[in-house]
Image: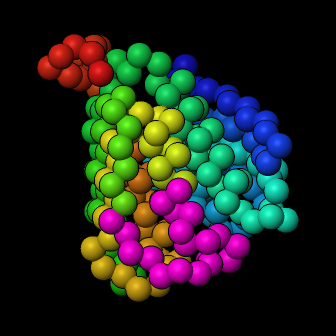
């Protein structure tokens, strides 16, 4: 079973997160940040990865710690659920439109964490979600999961549309990358290891 549960408790956040890589995209998310809940639900739906998240953070300060720590925990859970990473497609990509926004995502489950974030978002908030936290969330996620992740905005003006396209595109690419391929059982690498 490709599942994992990760708990993170700090003085700033208390997070419990469960993933099932072989799910149907069902999500139950409660972070106290409505737009972020919506985005994590979209990532789950478009990846077909079941996701349960309960996060309590110091929102009286601001949403930064909660959002970043959710990225850390999601990355750790993905890494744990993948195990030895044998028999997976490894690479995933998506070109995803949302109204005027068009986002391109490519990722590699490589054990070489790297984020390229070419998404020019205007400063401000979408609900209680600061637009700058999109990059922070995906950096934490990529580093902890061991992903090479490229996210590029090709067009768009509306911050809600851009961020939603990003989360959906990452979900779509992730779902492709974690998919098992019955044609081989080892690690997809010419080196034999990641």
Q: Is residue 27 left or right of residue 61?
A: left
Is residue 147 something that shows in the picture? yes
Q: Position of residue 4 (x, y in %)?
A: 61, 26
The answer to which of 51 and 59 lies nearer the viewer is: 59
Q: Where is residue 32 in the image (x, y as percent from the top left)?
A: 78, 61
Q: In this view, does 161 lie to the left or right of 153?
A: right
The answer to which of 141 and 93 lies nearer the viewer is: 141
Residue 90 picture quarter: top left
> What's the magenta region?
118-136
Give the quarter of the figure containing the N terminus.
top right
Q: Position of residue 36 (x, y in %)?
A: 64, 62
Colour pattern of the rendering: rainbow
The residue sitting at the left extreme is 190
Task: Relative to 160, say whether 36 is above or below.
Answer: above
Residue 152 is one of the magenta-drawn residues: no
Give the quarter of the figure containing the C terminus.
top left
The answer to which of 157 and 4 lies nearer the viewer is: 157
Q: Is residue 30 left or right of residue 161?
A: right
Is residue 50 something that shows in the picture? no
Question: For the point 75% across and 65% down, which residue is it?
Answer: 62
Residue 135 is one of the magenta-drawn residues: yes
Residue 42 picture quarter: bottom right
Residue 19 picture quarter: top right
Question: For the point 32% across and 70% down, which residue is it?
Answer: 153
Question: For the point 70% across and 54% down, which residue is it?
Answer: 65
Question: For the point 83% across and 43% down, which residue is it?
Answer: 11
Q: In this view, does 186 lie to the left or right of 113?
A: left
Q: Position of residue 81 (x, y in %)?
A: 53, 25
Q: How many labels does the image show?
A: 0
């Amino acid at each position: 079973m490709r599942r994992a549960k990760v708990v993170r408790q700090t003085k700033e956040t208390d997070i419990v997160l469960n993933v099932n890589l072989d799910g149907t995209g069902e999500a139950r998310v409660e972070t106290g940040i409505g737009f972020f809940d919506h985005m994590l639900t979209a990532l789950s739906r478009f990846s077909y990865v079941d996701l349960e998240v309960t996060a309590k953070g110091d929102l009286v300060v601001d949403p930064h710690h909660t959002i970043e720590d959710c990225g850390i925990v999601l990355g750790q859970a993905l890494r744990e659920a993948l195990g030895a990473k044998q028999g997976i497609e490894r690479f995933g990509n998506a070109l995803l439109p949302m109204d005027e926004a068009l986002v391109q995502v490519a990722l590699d489950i490589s054990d070489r964490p790297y984020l390229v974030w070419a998404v020019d978002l205007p400063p401000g908030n979408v609900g209680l979600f600061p637009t700058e936290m999109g990059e922070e969330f995906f950096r934490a996620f990529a580093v902890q999961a061991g992903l090479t992740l490229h996210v590029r905005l090709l067009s768009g003006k509306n911050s809600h549309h851009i961020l939603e396209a990003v989360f959906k595109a990452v979900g779509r690419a992730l779902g492709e990358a974690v998919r098992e391929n019955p044609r081989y059982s080892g690690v997809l690498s010419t080196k034999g290891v990641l």
